[in-house]
Amino acid sequence: MSVSGRCQFVLALAVILVTGCQTAPQGQPSTPPSGSATGLAGGLPTPTLVTITSEHPVLRLGPFGVGNLACNGQTMAFSTSSAPRQSRNDLIKVAGMDGSNVHVVARATHGGTLTDAVPVSADWVVFLEYAQAGQGASANFWYLNAASLRDGHLVGLASATAPPGALELPTYAVSGNQVLWAQVAPDGSQALLTQDLAVGARSQVPLPAYMRPFSPSIAGSTVVFIDDETSAPASADVQHGGSLQRIDLGSASIRSLERPVVYAPVTNGKTVIWTTDAQDPLHPGPNLVWSPVIGSIDGGQPRRLAAVGDLTLLSDEFAAWPDHETRDIFAYRMNSGRLAEIRVAGRDDLRAVLALCGSTLLYALPPEVDGDQSVIRSIDLAHILPG
């Protein structure tokens, strides 16, 4: 499966302080969309409240913050800073899942930040260096790269240093040696591209001319993405919503999976999870919240998993997401349909940088609420939700 680039970036920042290049409020319309999520199967699953009384630290980083985080079951990757208490992330580091063998695999080389997502496969970590234009939402430049976990060599994938390409940051994902990204082309159109990092072969994914792909996720040859055909290029902080599309890279066959407004899909090759707009159950009115929905990659009736939930993570076994209203983390086990609301004793706020691989959920709280230190901790979801 893959971790999507901008998807996880939004998750990581939105669950900290709802700050940064993309935030949940900017991605949510203030009035209901023209479509609604009809045809959802069943009612909402009832969560079991689980309180963790003893946390499990994996890696202590001291006063060096974690900008984003990802894992693949053997390795974790994260963006961080070379100077203590620095908001700009200029390093990409990797470590074993037990916190061993921490080392730098990439650095910012253009004076930008590396705060965006760091999706990682068995052999590669993909990252984005960019700089925002002053206090505005657009970017001055961006450079998309991949770093080998074996020998550290870098592969340049794409870049933009002038409009329209630099106006909006690319969204990206990786699975095995295949990296996939969506970017604004020089003519202002939106393109979906893929590259085999092992052999260097690059191609543009064939899509109908009217489609505008965003937020891709890839697992093997299966790709899902958002088609935001109604939108023009906007700004670097837009979280695009649209229809959910699936394409098979081998056959190039396309299938529409969901028409209501869908945001930030993630697939593991069999299942796809996304967020959609929903009425806020705690604050009735015109404003909408995000709500997680899960479905089969082959279509059929999707199921809403919670009334409120920010951008989601997915492994082969579990889904997880933060809830900005309860400030807890929710986990869903797919084979049993069981849902857990996770709290940690002594902590009122679990808005953190998150990563999920297998049954391991990693989280890093902001240093300002964690004793001026950054600590990456883990939760065993198989223990929380036994099969």
Image: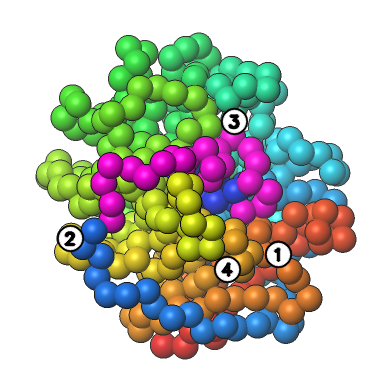
**Nearer the camera: disc 3 or disc 2:** 2
**Nearer the camera: disc 1 or disc 3:** 1
Closer to the chain start, of discs 4 and 1, is 4
**Nearer the camera: disc 2 or disc 4:** 4
Q: Magenta stretch containing residue 18, yes or no?
A: yes
Q: Is residue 336 above or below residue 260?
A: below
Residue depicted at 71% across the width and 45% down the height = 80
Residue identified by numbered label 1: 349
Residue identified by numbered label 2: 298
Q: Seen from this angle, which residue lies furthest front?
A: 285
Instruction: Name the element at disc 1.
Output: loop
373 to the left or right of 18 = right
Q: Which mark is residue 129?
A: 3
Q: Quadrant of the C terminus?
A: bottom left
Closer to the chain start, of discs 2 and 4, is 2
Tag 4: residue type? Ile
Nearer to me, 367 or 40 = 40
Q: Few, some or many C-alpha atoms within 10 Å of disc 4 (few <14, some 14-19, many ≥20)?
A: many
Residue identified by numbered label 4: 329
Closer to the chain start, of discs 1 and 3, is 3
